[in-house]
Image (cartoon, coloured by chain):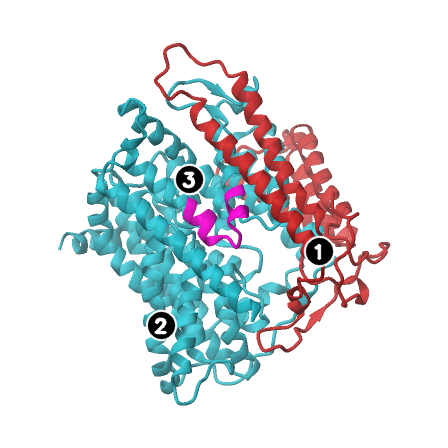
Chain colours: A red, B cyan
Amino acid sequence: MTTSSPAPPSDDTAAGTTAKPQPSGMAELVVPAILVAIAVFLIIGTATMVEPPSVQRPGPAFFPGIIIGLLLIMAVLSTVQTLRTVRARRAGLLQDEQEAHLDADGDPIEEIPPDPPPGREPWPAGAVTDWRAVLTVLGSLVAFMVLLRPAGWIVAAAALFWGVAYALGSRRPIFDVSVALVMSSVIQLTFGYLLGLNLPAGFLAGVM
Amino acid sequence: MDQLSNLMQGFSLALTPINLVWVVVGCVLGTAVGVLPGLGSAMAVALLLPVTFSLDPVGAFIMFAGIYYGGLFGDSTTAILMNTPGNSTAIASTFEGHRMAKRGRAPQALATAAIGAFTGGLLATILVVFFAPVLAELATVFGPAEYFALAVVAFVATAAVVADSAVKGLSALAIGLAIALIGVDAISGAARYTFGVPSLLDGIDIVVITVGLLALGEVLFIASRIHKDPEATAMKISGRPYLSGKEFREALPAWLRGSAFGLPFGAIPAGGAEIPTFLAFGLERNLDRRRAEPQFGTGAIRGLAAPEAAANATAGSAMGSLLALGLPTSATAAIMLAAFQQYGMQPGPLLFVRNGELVWALLASLFIGMIVLLVINLPFAPLWAKLLMIPKPYLYAGITVFSALGVYASSGSIFDVAMLTVIGLLGFALRRFGLPLAPVLIAVILGPLAETSLRRALAISEGDPGALFSSGLTITLYFLLLLGLVWVAFSRLRSRAQADI
């Protein structure tokens, strides 16, 4: 939903650095889409709501009605705002974005452009979101949910830790996995035993 | 003086060894998350909320308060050394603070910030001790219409006044209110928006929402940007690490003026410390222009001292309004309100009566915490900056594991972890498109209060909306809100006009 839109004109094309997460224009329409989706969710839920007999007025559908209205109004307003911003940017009216690399004195901010992780090509300057990293984090969470009950906390949490560290560019598998296992084991010991939180032991159930 | 004897009893409870440990743990954690950009006290309290259930509530709240104050001490460190505010509350400190550092006065800047935070927090806490019980007494006459007015003021103030764009703020507010609707309706008992899923009958757990929005949302956002956003570098620190008497006298009036800005803003629901820090900074700049030798632009000590004092004064009076009225005025206060509810307590007028012991121990621990924070921040600020050397992959992987731990531990359900992922994605989308998070949190936490008090007020008046504006208090609240909106609209128009010139 984001990467396809054209990059705003910027002169800092050096090695894939961009200033801030720049609103790349039409992608902002995701906001009204989310608002409308939530409003539709509430409308369907209100229509199918079973009201208990003889409820006090105003009933359970009263306040949701107000919120549905607010959601839809905001969806319209943010669509209008986005389209106006896109038009203004096309006309070259938004200058201030290029000043993002200067500090309050107007001196350039010393910044080190991050290295892309091994095996990845540099990012296109216009792309805002690194979807591969986001999906890796989400995948790690799914793996955690699948693994937690059968394999136990230590394994599932270590897998989650390593998955997120990998997504964020850590590329030392043996070291990363060791850190992950130490962390999940320490949590199992401190929180599971000392604070009495209920964490599944998994295959270690018999041992511990 | 009732308050003083209560406070002394609070000290006797807060000064037990185990509670002192919680104060120190809270202060250290708070400073750490304050120093790290992107992490804040709200996230830290949210992550700790589920794992502290087995603690005694006094210990848990003492720790949370330490985190809240500590976050405001720590956030200026990176603002000064790296021109990167640790939190939005330190943006105003960045301007002159970083200029001081660039001119070789980094240690003085760090000391000015720490003492400023101490001054602001101390003054605010003293006022809270004396006025919170009085405020709580006043609030005992609040009816549903008054509570609804308070909630509306909190909603509109955080959404429209604090956010850069009213549309974005109100959108975030509407999303939060919608999330809060899910579950069994408190008045009629009707199941709402559960779509037959039994796990949703109790609503989405507040732990899932706060951890998802603040922690997992941040992780996803960082993941989406990690290889693209450049990293700032910290400056080297050298020279004498203390303030000279002249510098101290120079900063003192700014500390006091800054505190005066922060105090009222913490008590009203204007969503945190951003506005008072900027107001305090603006006043110092205007005063500076009238001096014989203007200092601003060259690292003026007053331009740093005032916003730092303002930020921590806000935190102090925010605690007062949370305890006395049950009204959260910042994201962290909102999560602390949720924490009170988890322990079966309702902040507000009755808290001082029902849980007086806890309240006074908490207030006493705020004083202890302030001294602890001054000690761990004044000489050691450069050490805290070293936290930035933690590799980001491990930092955020650890946050993710802690999020999963908290959510699973509080409910034991995989479904909640799945909900966490969904809310995390929502938090990511909000960050990606620049929607503020505080209105979502305040809406989720105050939404049910707003709804029940609105419906009760209307039920009592048999549907006459005039009942919402019938008491002097409600009219005053709405009038103040209107005044705030007009002021914001006016100042935005003015700054737009200036930008055009």
> Looking at the image, is A16 positioned above or below residue A190?
below
The foreground one among A176 and B309 is B309
Q: CA distance from mark 2 to mark 3?
A: 32 Å
Q: Secondary structure at mark 3?
A: helix
- Locate residue A109 relative to residue B482 in the image: left or right: right
Q: Which mark is residue B495?
A: none
x, y percent for residue B269: 38, 49
The foreground one among B363 and A2 is A2
> Looking at the image, is B175 positioned above or below residue B200?
below
The foreground one among B468 and B213 is B468
| Label 2 in the same subunit as label 3 | yes
User: Mark 2 or mark 3, which has the lower sequence index?
Assistant: 2
Q: CA distance from mark 1 to mark 2?
A: 37 Å
Q: Which mark is residue B226?
A: 1
Q: Residue B158: within the magenta?
A: yes
Please state which amino acid type lies under the numbered disc 3: Ala
Give the label, 2 or 3, closer to the camera: 2
- Locate residue A80 relative to residue B494 in the image: left or right: right
Which residue in the protein does label 2 denote?
Answer: B255
Q: Which residues are magenta?
A: B156-171
